[in-house]
Image (tube, helix red, strand yellow):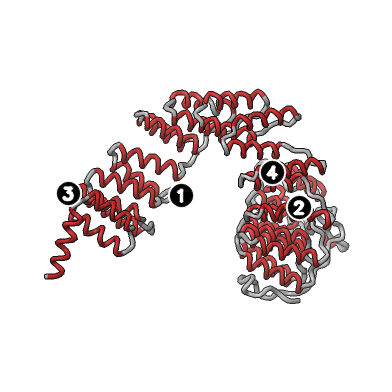
Amino acid sequence: MTTYSAEVFPHSLPNASHLKLPPTSHPHRLFSCKLRTSPSEVPSKMPPQAKVFPSPMPSHLPSLDLKETQLTKLFKKSYKAGNFNDAFYFLESMVNRGCKPDVVLCTKLIKAFFDTRNVDKAVRVMGILEAHGDPDVFAYNAMISGFCKSNRIEAANEVLNRMRHKGYAPDIVTYNIMIGSLCSRGKFDLALRVLEKLLKDKCKPTVVTYTILMEATIIQGGINEAMKLFNEMLSRGLRPDMYVYNTIIRGMCRGGMADQALEFVHSMPWKGCQPDLISYNIILRALLDRGKWEEGKKLVQEMLSRGCQPNVVTYSILITALCREGKVEEAVNVLKAMAEQGLKPDNYSYDPLISAFCREGKVDLAIGLLDLMISNGCLPDIVNYNTVLAALCKNGEADQALGIFDKLSEVGCHPNASSYNTMICALWGSGDRLRALRMASEMVSKGIDPDEITYNSVLSWLCRDGMVDEAMQLLEDMESSCFKPTVISYNMVMLGLCKAHRIDDAIKLLEEMVEKGCRPNETTYTLLIEGIGFAGWRAEAMQLADAMVSMNAISQDSFKRLGKTFPMLDVYREVSASETKD
């Protein structure tokens, strides 16, 4: 039996025995214990020597002075109740009594520990099963799947190799797990090599195998490669389901091939498969995104003629497209028609209208739409509220926005980072800096991590109000957060320092920026040049500008603009030229 090459699975284990363990004969039981036939084998009152060191007994569990059947019931009861650690304790204890673990229930426990992110316990369960029971391909698949979901590909490779060395041939589920994991991490080439290995091992790929590969190919922008895989699947006699067809349709539409997607849909009946409502919705969205309304109307007519009735998604697509083109009144009519058809609009139906009303300055209508949503049993989400909050703050109605913000938790819609960012900027912009900073502290105290927008917004306001030292301190705080300062962050502080004529500090900031791996951009250099010039060192500023142009760090357009800002540039260049001649 061949194994994976080191290039595909570089962390393979050393060769082990190829002995295949026999499957358990009682898959429905937790344990199958050997009968003791000789008096010498009768257990004493003292517990036997442990083969597995059990975990400390939880305080709420009974003494182990129980019969095996009672322990089995306790194991099952603990597992069903979701008390997996208790179940694991009983598993260890019963194995120590010489009982053989049941592979089915151990596999379930392995999955449960992976689902609860207790990887170490899952590994220990598998260790017990390998040492004292008969693991099967399903148990190994559970381990491989768990490791893959935990982004521990090397550990999954080790289990795969150990599985093969013990004589268990991977099945199609095993291969699909590995292929899916590699594809989800962008390792498409390795996934294709696993497919090759699958075929060499005479393991037949399924529709699922090809679907995973096609989706990965489409994400990378290769619809042509996806079609090759689709045709290969057909050549192997595999019949695609609607999910496969819709995957191809979606890939074509994402690649700007809506017309080809439509042709593909029309060819589906010849392949023995009728397009469904999802197929039509995918193409309708693609057509309307490109402003092809006539084609969209024809598509809807075709859809109706085939007996596909529009659903909430269909109407939401129409509402979004109409709002995007400023046809808000027509979008409202579509919303009404949707309700008349007995369909209940969802958040995706209302959101484009709320955004459109806010863009047009009709915030009162947007708030009215929120009320309508609630009365129709569709609770607005935080995205809907954030849109209204931003519009109110933009219109200078921070107090009204704050009133809505304070009631969000009461209606079961808790603010997120975007909500706080909006309110912090509004309060600071209205001059209430103290309250803005208090809200930033409240945000952190409630466990909502500031994002890049939060940091950059506060940096901007601090620098605008001349609080440059505070801005530099915040820049240092960002270094210890999960959001490292970007070039935008540094440029804001650079502007603040230059406005304060703190040129030495600005130059030091540029050095620090480069040392920490943040590459300056044209704006960075332009700000520094302007800062040096406005601080009274025009000749030095122009000398730096000249050097930056020669290094392609700033463009000729920026250089010309700086020339208009500091007219001494021409004089400086003439002096430089004369000195060169001398």
* Residue 104 in view: no
Q: Amino acid at mark 3?
A: Gly
Badge number at residue 536: 3
Residue 265's disc number: 2
Describe residue 267's horizontal placement relative to residue 254 as left or right. Answer: right
Q: Secondary structure at mark 2?
A: helix
Q: Could you tell me which secondary element the residue under label 3 belongs to?
A: loop
Give the Cα separation between the discs numbered 3 and 4.
Answer: 62 Å
Q: Earlier in the sequence, mark 4 or mark 1?
A: 4
Measured as percent of width and height from the top left, residue 363 is found at 52, 26
The amino acid type found where label 2 is placed reads Val
Q: Residues within 10 Å of mark 1 (few under 14, many from 20)?
A: few
Residue 296: give its label. 4
Residue 541, horizontal then vertical, whole percent: 22, 55
Q: Are marks 1 and 2 in contact (CB under 8 Å)?
A: no
Q: Residues within 10 Å of mark 4 (few under 14, many from 20)?
A: some
Please give the residue where the numbered disc 1 appears in the rendered image. Answer: 482
Q: CA distance from mark 3 to mark 2?
A: 69 Å
Instruction: Compare residues 107 and 99 and report the one nearer the observer.
Output: 107
Distance in Å between CA atoms under marks 4 and 1: 44 Å
How far separated are the C-alphas under marks 1 and 2? 45 Å
